[in-house]
Image (cartoon, grey):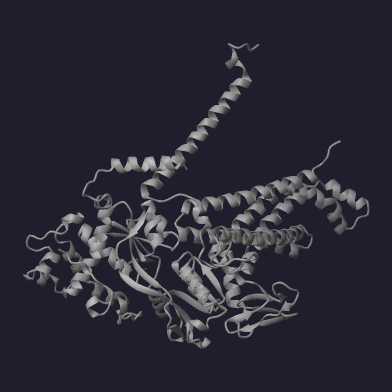
Amino acid sequence: MNRLKLAGAAIALGLMVSPAMASKTLEAIKKKGEVSCGVNTGLGGFGIADSSGKWTGFDVDFCRAVAAAALGDANKVRYVPLSAAQRFTALQSGEIDLLSRNTTWTMSRDTQLGTTFGVTTFYDGQGFLIPKKLKVKSAKQLKGATVCVQSGTTTEKNLADYFRQQKMQYKPVVYEDLKALIAAYNEGRCAVFTSDASQLAAIRANDMKVPDDHMILPEIISKEPLGPLVRRGDDDWAKLVTWVHFAMITAEELEITSANVDAKRSETIPEIQRLLGQGNNDFGKSIGVDAAWAYRVIKQVGNYGEVFERNVGAKTPLKLSRGQNDLWTKGGLQYAPPIR
Amino acid sequence: MGGGIFLLSNKRVRALIWQVVLGLVLLAGLGVLVQNLSDNMARRGVEFGFGFLSGPAGFDIAERLIAYDADSTYWRAYVVGVINTLRVALIGIVLATLFGLMIAIGSLSFNPLLQRLCRGYVEVIRNVPLLLQLFFWYLSLAAGLPDNDNPFELGLGIVLSKSGLQIPWFIEGGWDLEFPEAGPFGMVGGAALSPEFMALLAGLSIYTSAFIAEVIRAGILSVPKGQYEAARALGLSAGQQLRFVILPQAMRVAIPPMTNQYLNLTKNSSLAVAIGYPELVSVATTTLNQTGHAVEALAILMLVYLTMSLLTSLLMHRFERATALRER
């Protein structure tokens, strides 16, 4: 591959693309009439289809929020289930417009793949799931264990790093398919299962024969900031996706929910008016949508707290607490820049 | 005939010109594809380069015959993958040939029960997709192997459990044997054949043996009846007939299709990624996912398989030439 030729072609193409306000991806989406969203093949609480083919989950709700903002209808989404190995290629090739699939934000994924993150929608960390009958109370006692891990994930790398640091040997059992991995853990092929703590909660609740026979060890061995991923080179689309998340955080800060958003439209508080596009406020124009973009997101999908509680909260089988995902005013990490 | 002016009317020159034109068209087609790929990659901002191979891999591989850890390079990870593929392919080829030979001879026997059993085996095994057979073997082994708490002792220190088949093996750098014993998470010590390896070997050998059995049967049937009669006239027993007269002639016919089956087995080992055996494709897809260099990782993968296949073909051609009929 001639690097000069590649550079030349890139520059030529760059010059040909006019510095228009409109996002190419957004234009294509409006023409298609739907957002192509890459999701998990089946992870309870984050991206899973039920027997009638209806998709639900935290990441799925984010896709719906983006569709509500961009196309006006949260249901105009085409879900593309992707394995861990396929997800980046699907985004790079243009098969999907947005990857909302519990993907960890890392530097290499942000810089080397032609893709870019914008925001962290879910702060997570990697943990270990183990049957209680093995009487292991801490990850430091896992010397010599067989560990089930999904191939090609940050999980695999963090696992190697952790055991090296602790100077412990282990035997990885590596599969591409999550379901096969869970089956191997259930059969006893491996003693420990490692993944993001939220995934472990979902698996423990949904895929174990007796959930109470298993426990998640206290050690969280890595930072896993999960967020949506888009292609590089389309700043406006990236901004739209980022600000949909910030709008949902802002709505929770202002105590606007899907139930009361209609009533809130007539409030005169400037912050609320700016968020919902009342008065002369139109912040949607700068990201290629109309003024009521955030109103639609909140009305059709909900604010961040509602989405969290609906999919992974205390009333769901996952029973996750807000923890790091709480608002910054309540000690968590979710913080939105002001919409003004 | 054919002075300078009448060059085009010369058949050989015309043929040459056609070949050159065809060559140029093929090169042009290839060039268009490569240019399209590089343009698309540039447009998406995807880098191209093989530099990632010298970076640290960051992941561990459970089964390895050479020294490897998470700090080793991606390049070394590929080597480990190739060795794992060769390990299962070579043993698989030997086992498949042995089973295939036995089944072929059985399917031509005069005993009706044996004949029907062998024919039935071939029909069933040939017609079920390999991936399903691999899952069958793996799930049977995973469910059927005894728990790590009470493993099955086969004597001589060999132990069978959910961690696989553990045999006593030498501790590094010496001749002392290390015997497997129960640890908190499974058997430790000695060398192990993992359940993934055993399932893959069983599935691949049995699947390919059905095809090889048919190939050998065709070879045996191609030997003229006169040979059987001549051998019997010389006083050879049935077993000796087979060994000294029939099979050597049958193999001549059977070798090209057998080469096919060996290549198929090697390439089918790539299905191991579905049952967790860390062979070449598994390592390549992990690399692809960790680094994002999809095109390069797959290109290396294809090149390695092509090399292995070409080497196998070369060896089999040599073998074929060695056993060919020499006419006087």
Quadrant that contains the C terminus of chain B: top right
Q: Is B71 rendered above or below residue B150?
A: above
Q: Nearer the viewer, residue A324 or B191?
A: A324
Q: Nearer the viewer, residue A125 or B11?
A: A125
Q: Residue at x 76, y 74 (%)?
A: B175
Q: x%, y% of residue A278? A: 9, 64
Q: x%, y% of residue A175? A: 51, 67
Q: Nearer the viewer, residue B226 or A211?
A: A211
Q: Is B132 rendered above or below residue B236?
A: below
Q: Nearer the viewer, residue A323 or B276?
A: A323
Q: x%, y% of residue B121? A: 67, 63
Q: Is A98 rendered above or below residue A190?
A: above
Question: Where is residue B137, by image quadrant?
Answer: bottom right
Q: Mark yes or no: residue A66 visible.
A: yes
Question: Where is residue A275, by image quadrant?
Answer: bottom left
> In the drawing, does residue B225 fall left or right of residue B304?
right
Q: Is B128 rendered above or below residue A205?
A: above
Quadrant that contains the N terminus of chain B: top right
Q: x%, y% of residue A52? A: 34, 68
> In the drawing, does residue A91 fall left or right of residue A306?
right
